[in-house]
Image (cartoon, rainbow, N blue to C red):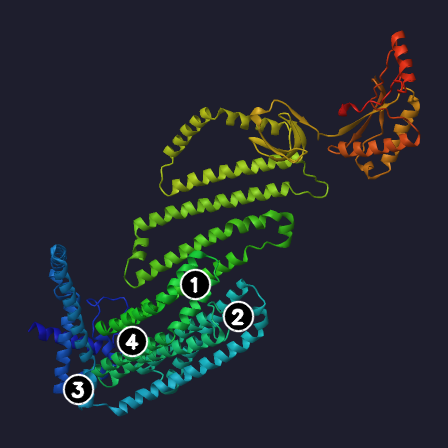
């Protein structure tokens, strides 16, 4: 009695489901969605939004019940659906006991899992093997049941009402031809419009091409909508009476046209067969056309087969025939796609490897190379899973597959678009306007040093989010549900706040660095001194450290880390380091005061710690110097007690010239003035400040009279000016015969005695040369003695 009541309810739902004109969602569960809705082709996933007249549904039900074989087939189908529903959802069989059954089922599952864990491996393997065999048997039974309609049609049990089929074909053909004609006309106008901007798109940047791609894709989808509206207009005005509305067949045909057209728009968005300048993927023109045509055929076959042929067969012929057509359409489509994957396996793998070899990111390169060997397996698995869904859940398979596939395609397309934009930004770098580069020459290099790293991290996050969304779409994990939960929202909120803190700190640091660069740039009327350059560099280093520490602490605080112990620990560690590194602290404090007092700047010639040389680098702790011989010295400020700087405000060359005692002093001074005049006529006049300061005779030395003069020069030019002045002094002294003395030594020998004189005479008589009474030799220079 209960079975008869359920059968009657099922039949009534079968009759009135289309007349209700209610849209069934693709996410409905088997327990909540009536399996009979697709039979009439309006309320199911492959049905249209318009219903069937109650009279037609009543007549179809009467014809079915009057036929004994059809009635038996209906009963058999109802029993199989009831069994499958109960197997899929045991709680749906009895709403009153649903909660109890669910609890008992979960308890039973736990008991079975416990027993399975305690069983030997061989027993578990046997259970899994039996489960696979049972699933294969169920699969075979469902295949036989799906082909039952073809058997009944061949043996004459089900008869085709050809006049009714002809009317349906006439209605569908008229609206489809109208919709296709308007669609082709819109496509022709779109191509003609795009050709006008062809050159502008080709020579534009990646942002321009991306904008054109989005605009042309929207226009492409608009042509599909125009065709769909035109088809509806033709259906209302030309075929049916104005007060009858659109028939079910017409609605099915137009919905199939709309869905397949939009999916093909997505294919043209990805491959862009006629718009190579806007192509996202690294395809050539021939592969782009190949994949667009092949995948377009798959979309056409499945779209019109499932959304048009199956509902039309359900309404015009029989539900069993529609079920057979559904199975054959899915099977043929799956076989075609599997053959397509097999045929292009090596070509696609080679293309993926070639594309991966040109990537700059090592992670992306490795990922794509692994995908090159696994893409075919993923594609095979996808096709087989879709086919399995079609076999085990035939009534909501379209909703499941279209929803999951469509969302997956949209997710992957969005991820690819974002990744390509980010990749081009990484490879092309950040380019600032010319006036910005002239004012802040270091800003672009600084952006290109940091922004690509942030973009690589962002691209990795996009990849991970895409994978999680795909897993959620196919029901593996509940990522989106977790995101909408309180825990997920709190997690994302914390890390988003931390990312915003880091981003704000980077922008603030970048602005301060740009201001420092602007202050260090010499302009008309503004000269950057060595002291300003050194102080700004020290400020830049200190500010960078402060920003990094503060941003890290604030980011850790946002993600939930208690930074109080970190700050306290840092204070303790800092105190311990200060006690153990007193010399370091002294270096820093002394260096800070040296910089504040402007005692040393980079490029100065100084004497520090007994070393004289040029300052090459200056930090807050030490100074790097290079002496005249090229030796580099690193001197910590803790060892500095005095700084002698030769480069402050101005300098002096002190000329100390020695002349012989018999030289006219006034003539010597005049010669030195002449040498200075000649020096002032050379390029050194730009470095000389004022005239020659003559100090006069400063010392009576052993061999000379020293005359001192002084030349005032710009800082750092006293040595070069002094060397040039000495050359002119030598030239003038030579011209005026002024003697420049050098150290001399005179040896005097005492007069000989009488005995020595007798010996000398005796020696003369024997022919020996007499010894000289006096010998004067020029003493060698003092440095050679």
Give the number of the mark in front: 3 or 4.
4
447 vs 723, left or right, is left
Q: Secondary structure at mark 1?
A: helix
72 vs 722, left or right, is left
Residue at screen point 31% across, 69% down: 382
40 vs 628, left or right, is left
Is residue 657 visible to the viewer in this orientation of the structure?
yes
Horizontal and vertical percent for residue 509? 53, 42
Give the number of the mark in front: 4 or 2.
2
Q: Which residue is mark 2?
A: 277
Q: Which residue is mark 3?
A: 63
Image quarter of residue 651: top right
Mark 3 → mark 1, Cα distance in angstroms: 54 Å
Task: Answer few, some or many: residues within 10 Å of disc 3's Cα (few below 14, many 20 plus, some between 14 and 19).
Answer: few
Image quarter of residue 660: top right
Rendered view: 277 above or below 186 = above
Mark 3 → mark 4, Cα distance in angstroms: 24 Å
Q: Which residue is mark 4?
A: 46
């Amino acid at each position: 009695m209960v079975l008869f009541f359920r059968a009657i309810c099922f039949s009534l739902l079968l009759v009135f489901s289309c007349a209700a004109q209610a849209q069934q969602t693709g996410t409905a569960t088997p327990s909540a969605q009536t399996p009979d809705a697709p039979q009439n082709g309006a309320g199911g996933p492959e049905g249209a939004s318009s219903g069937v007249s109650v009279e037609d549904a009543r007549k179809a039900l009467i014809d079915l019940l009057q036929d004994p074989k059809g009635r038996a087939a209906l009963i058999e189908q109802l029993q199989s659906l009831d069994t499958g529903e109960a197997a899929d959802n045991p709680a749906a069989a009895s709403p009153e006991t649903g909660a109890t059954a669910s609890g008992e089922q979960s308890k039973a599952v736990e008991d079975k899992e416990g027993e399975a864990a305690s069983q030997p491996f061989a027993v578990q393997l046997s259970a899994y093997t039996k489960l696979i065999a049972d699933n294969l048997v169920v699969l075979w039974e469902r295949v036989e049941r799906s082909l039952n309609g073809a058997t009944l049609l061949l043996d004459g049990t089900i008869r085709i009402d050809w006049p009714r089929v002809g009317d349906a074909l006439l209605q569908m053909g008229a609206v489809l031809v109208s919709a296709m004609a308007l669609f082709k006309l819109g496509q022709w106008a779109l191509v003609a419009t795009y050709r006008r901007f062809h050159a502008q798109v080709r020579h534009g940047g990646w942002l321009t091409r991306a904008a054109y791609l989005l605009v042309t894709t929207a226009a492409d989808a608009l042509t599909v909508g125009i065709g769909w509206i035109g088809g509806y207009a033709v259906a209302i005005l030309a075929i049916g009476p104005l007060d009858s509305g659109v028939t079910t067949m017409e609605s099915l045909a137009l919905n199939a046209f709309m869905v397949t057209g939009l999916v093909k728009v997505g294919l043209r968005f990805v491959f862009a067969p006629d718009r190579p300048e806007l192509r996202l993927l690294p395809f050539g023109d021939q592969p782009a056309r190949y994949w667009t045509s092949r995948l377009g055929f798959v979309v056409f076959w499945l779209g019109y087969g499932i959304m048009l042929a199956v509902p039309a067969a359900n309404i015009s012929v029989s539900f069993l025939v529609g079920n057979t057509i559904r199975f054959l359409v899915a099977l043929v489509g799956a076989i075609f796609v599997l053959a397509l994957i097999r045929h292009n396996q090596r070509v696609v793998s080679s293309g993926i490897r070639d594309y991966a070899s040109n990537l700059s990111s090592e992670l992306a390169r490795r990922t794509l190379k692994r995908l090159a060997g696994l893409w075919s397996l993923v594609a095979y698995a996808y096709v087989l899973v879709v086919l399995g869904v079609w076999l085990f859940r035939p009534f909501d398979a379209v909703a499941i597959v279209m929803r999951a596939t469509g969302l997956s395609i949209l997710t992957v397309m969005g991820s690819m678009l974002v990744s390509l934009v980010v990749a081009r930004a990484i490879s092309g770098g950040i380019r600032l306007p010319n006036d910005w580069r002239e004012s802040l020459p270091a800003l672009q290099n600084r952006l290109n040093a940091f922004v690509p790293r942030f973009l690589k991290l962002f691209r990795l996050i996009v990849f991970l989010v895409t994978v999680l969304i795909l897993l959620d779409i196919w029901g593996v994990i509940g990522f989106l549900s977790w995101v909408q939960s309180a825990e997920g929202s709190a997690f994302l909120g914390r890390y988003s706040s931390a990312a915003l803190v880091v981003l704000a700190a980077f922008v603030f640091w970048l602005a301060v660095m740009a201001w420092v660069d602007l202050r260090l740039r010499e302009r008309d009327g503004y000269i950057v001194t060595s002291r300003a350059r050194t102080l700004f560099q020290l400020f830049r280093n200190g500010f960078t450290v402060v920003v990094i520490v503060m941003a890290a602490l604030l980011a850790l605080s946002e993600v939930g880390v208690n930074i109080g112990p970190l700050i306290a620990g840092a204070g303790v560690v800092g105190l311990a380091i200060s006690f153990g590194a007193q010399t370091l602290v002294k270096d820093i404090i002394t260096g800070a005061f040296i910089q504040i007092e402007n005692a040393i700047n980079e490029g100065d010639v100084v004497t520090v710690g007994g070393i004289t040389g040029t300052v090459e680098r200056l930090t807050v702790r030490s100074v790097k110097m290079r002496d005249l011989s090229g030796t580099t010295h690193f001197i910590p400020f803790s060892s500095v007690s005095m700084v002698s700087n030769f480069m402050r405000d101005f300098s002096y060359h002190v000329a100390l010239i020695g002349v012989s005692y018999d030289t006219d002093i006034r003539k010597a001074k005049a010669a030195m003035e002449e040498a200075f005049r000649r020096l002032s006529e050379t390029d050194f006049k730009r470095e000389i400040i004022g005239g020659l300061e003559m100090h006069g005779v400063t010392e009576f030395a052993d061999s000379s009279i020293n005359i001192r003069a002084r030349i005032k020069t710009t800082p750092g030019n006293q040595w070069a000016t002094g060397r040039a002045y000495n050359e002119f002094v030598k030239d003038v002294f030579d011209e005026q015969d002024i003697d420049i003395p050098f150290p001399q030594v005179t040896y005097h020998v005492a007069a000989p005695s009488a005995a020595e004189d007798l010996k000398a005479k005796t020696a003369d008589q024997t022919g020996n040369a007499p010894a000289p009474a006096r010998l004067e030799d020029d003493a060698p220079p003092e440095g050679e003695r």
